[in-house]
Amino acid sequence: MKTRTAYLMESDQEARRLDLKTDRERLEEQARWAGLQPGMRVIDVGCGSGKTSSFLHRMVHPGGEVLGIDASPERVAHARSHYGVAGLGFACRDFYDPLLDLGQFDFVWVRFVLEYHRREAARIVENLMSILAPGGILCLIDLDHNCLNHYGMPPRLESALTAIMGQLETHGNFDPYMGRKLYSFLYDLGCQKIDVRLSAHHLIIGELNDVDAFNWLRKVEVAVKNSGYGFPEYAGGFQEFTQEFQAFFSDPRRFTYTPLIACRGSRPK
């Protein structure tokens, strides 16, 4: 498999962004739906800050264990210092590489990861299938139409945002439509008992809360700024685009949503 593309959201505040936007109640509900149970051996792929791994770890007690892996040494260090406890470990590993030395897992969790690896996503899932125990569960969760569902945007802002997402697809290896592809990945690998669920991830109306404000501003300040887009709609370039986006997004009349697609399947015994 080819060398990975640089992480689109890389910044010195990424661990904080990931921690803030991870909602325990929603995550645990998704994991229960996928079939997570006490006693399972779990791998959290692309674990980021480690907060998700910590929530999964609480759910596999008694007798279970969780390993979080991430290619970022900085975020693995953050995860170890903030969440490392008995039965919950973290390792700096690249899921583009073979992982067989880690052993087999009863539950493989891949949430908000594949969207950053558009060209390699299917091969990443195939690699992860190799560490799934027979009868184990592979759970893939991602967004669809990511960052593109807004109502009330000024026309030039909507035009620019659509073009930026296209730029990120072509040059940033980002896939705003990853969610709709997850089922096919499991189907093509011969998974059994495949199930799919569609729900809303972002549903933002009224006054903007601090977490959504920080999360979306970081998306603009990091991913959009580094997209390479030229902002021909704006005489003031990126700065003027950012000002207009902030004004729109802070308006309580704004309506924003993002579909979330969760897929689960079992490896044949």
Image (spheres, rainbow, N blue to C red):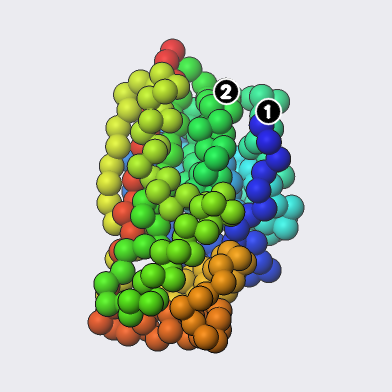
Neighbour tally class for label 1: few under 14, some 14-19, many 20 plus, Cα within 10 Å: some
Q: Quadrant of residue 207?
A: bottom left
Q: What residue is drawn where x is 52% and y is 44%? A: 118
| Element assignment for label 2 | loop
Q: Quadrant of residue 32?
A: top left
Check disc 2 and report the residue beneath it: 130
Left or right side of 163 for 43: right
The three-letter amino acid code for the residue at tag 2 is Ser
Q: Are marks 1 and 2 in contact (CB under 8 Å)?
A: yes
The quadrant of the image that shows the N terminus is top right
- Between 59 and 227, the one nearer to me in the picture: 227
Using the image, determine if residue 135 lies above or below residue 41: above
* Residue 247 in view (yes/no): yes
| Element assignment for label 1 | loop
Using the image, determine if residue 225 lies above or below residue 235: above
Check disc 1 and report the residue beneath it: 98
Give the numbered dot on residue 250.
none
Location of residue 134 in the rendering, given as x and y in whole percent from the top left corner? 48, 17
Location of residue 169 in the rendering, given as x and y in whole percent from the top left corner? 51, 52
Q: What residue is drawn where x is 38% and y is 30%? A: 184
